[in-house]
Image (spheres, rainbow, N blue to C red):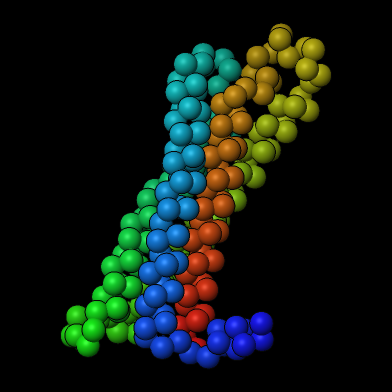
Amino acid sequence: MLDNLESLSHPPSKREFAATFLLVSRISFWVQLALGAISVIALSLAWFSRSSLTAKTNSAGIGFGIFLAIVGVILLSFRIYWALHYRRMAKLLQTPNSSSIQPKKEDVIKALRIGLIVSTIGLLIGFIASEQTVAVILGKALAQPQSLAVYQPENVIRPLDVFVMLANVNLIGVHLFGGVTSLGLLYWVED
């Protein structure tokens, strides 16, 4: 086991890094795509249920949560594209001795840093959106006992609220996963 840890502590060869980079980029792409799809579906359900509600029961707080979730999905779309970019770079690194085509170490580090920055911004937006959505849901729950909620529909916790929360929590997870993969590869290649 110590041999495995020691092998990770030394700078990787180009071949080792390219193989790991390709594997991690594939896993990252599919995980981000799956969690992103769940977020988009939950956000779509929230959007459609919001548009079918009357103005009396709409909550401005949930609207802001939906807006932040849309921004998070846009950032996620870039991260998914960037995972494909990682795959292309990894495949170029695996080409035999065509140094003019292969990306330089600095280019790989720059790409990993861009992915890490986008994931960090996505994490921040997802965290703010989740906190804000939880505050709205908590405010509704504490506004009055559930038996009286029938008389004040704006205080009822609706599926819309839960869908927005689900979308935002998934966005936090997907941006965290993307950030961790970029950070791990960046740490490994910079040694």
The image shows residue 127 at horizontal and vertical percentages of 60, 51
Q: Quadrant of residue 141?
A: top right
View extreme (top): residue? 151
- Residue 14, percent from left and from top: 37, 85
Give residue 180's position: percent from left, percent from top: 54, 66
Who's the residue at 78% across and 28% down the image?
Answer: 142
Q: Note whether 143 is above or below 126 in the view shown.
A: above
Q: Camera-side residue: 1 or 143? A: 1
Q: Residue at left 40%, top 64%?
A: 25
Horizontally, is 40 left or right of 180 in the view? left
Q: Is residue 47 left or right of residue 138?
A: left
Nearest the eye: 2 or 36: 2
The quadrant of the rendering that contains the N terminus is bottom right
User: Which residue is at 50% across, 33% downward?
Assistant: 42
Residue 64 visible in the shown view: no
Residue lying at 68% horizontally and 38% vertically, measured from the top left: 135
Residue 32 place in picture, x, y as percent: 45, 52
Please name whichever residue, 8 or 166, is drawn nearer the observer in this view of the structure. Answer: 8
Determine whether 88 is above or below 161 in the image.
Answer: below
- Reply above or below: 12 against 146: below
Report whether residue 186 is seen: yes
**Left or right of 118 in this view: 62:** right
Disc tally is 0
22 in relation to 132, above or below: below
Q: For this rendering, which residue is in front, 127 or 9?
A: 9
